[in-house]
Amino acid sequence: MGWIESRDAGSDLAGVLGHRPELQAKYQAFMGAIEADEAVPADILRLCKARVEFVHGGEDPKHRDLTDAEACAVKIADLMPHGYHSIEDADVTALVTHFGERGAVNLLTATSFYDVSARLNKVFEIKEQS
């Protein structure tokens, strides 16, 4: 198995990907670009990441009352891991209403990659620190 077998490179996904530095650099650059884009506020992206991790068995992120923008983002985060086929046009329209087209694409991309990260964390038995 090579690089997949060893978990001693680090206790996070970046550490595991460190076995393939070119992959690690591209992954971190991509995620950094998504999270640096101001089309979606950073706190909403963090909220979505926590929800995706929860869907995969992580800790329940106790939420205060959500704004309309947060609620539509969380709905996408809840559906992305196992119910992405249930994301409807109205859900995407709501994202566009709150975040614009660029923000909607950013949020959909971010939540899909949070899903990928959560799945890889489970494969490598990594506990994420959100």
Image: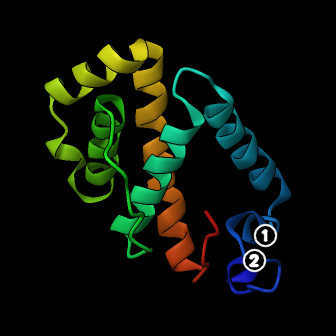
Mark sitting on residue 92: none
Judged from the image, the secondary structure of the residue bearing numbered disc 1 is: helix
**Camera-side residue of 78 and 117:** 78
Tag 2 residue: 3
Percent of width and height locating residue 49 = 49, 53
**Of pointers 2 and 1, the one earlier in the residue sequence:** 2
Q: Is residue 45 above or below residue 36?
A: below
Which amino acid type is marked by label 2?
Trp
Using residue 103 as the reference point, say whether residue 37 is left or right of it: right
Q: Residues within 10 Å of mark 1 (few under 14, many from 20)?
A: some
Q: Residues within 10 Å of mark 2 (few under 14, many from 20)?
A: few
Q: Residue at x 44, y 48 (%)?
A: 48
Q: Is residue 120 above or below residue 65?
A: below
Percent of width and height locating residue 55 = 33, 66
Percent of width and height locating residue 24 = 77, 55
Using residue 19 as the reference point, say whether residue 48 is left or right of it: left
Which amino acid type is marked by label 1?
Gly
Q: Quadrant of residue 5?
A: bottom right
Q: Residue at x 75, y 40 (%)?
A: 29
Q: Quadrant of residue 66?
A: top left
Which numbered disc, 2 or 1, marks the residue closer to the eye?
1
Tag 1 residue: 15
Spatial CA span between label 2 and label 1: 11 Å
Q: Residue at x 60, y 80 (%)?
A: 124
The quadrant in which the C terminus is found is bottom right
Judged from the image, the secondary structure of the residue bearing numbered disc 2 is: helix
Percent of width and height locating residue 21 = 85, 57
Using residue 93 as the reference point, say whether residue 32 is left or right of it: right
Q: Is residue 103 above or below residue 91?
A: above
The quadrant in which the N terminus is found is bottom right
Q: Residue at x 39, y 57 (%)?
A: 51
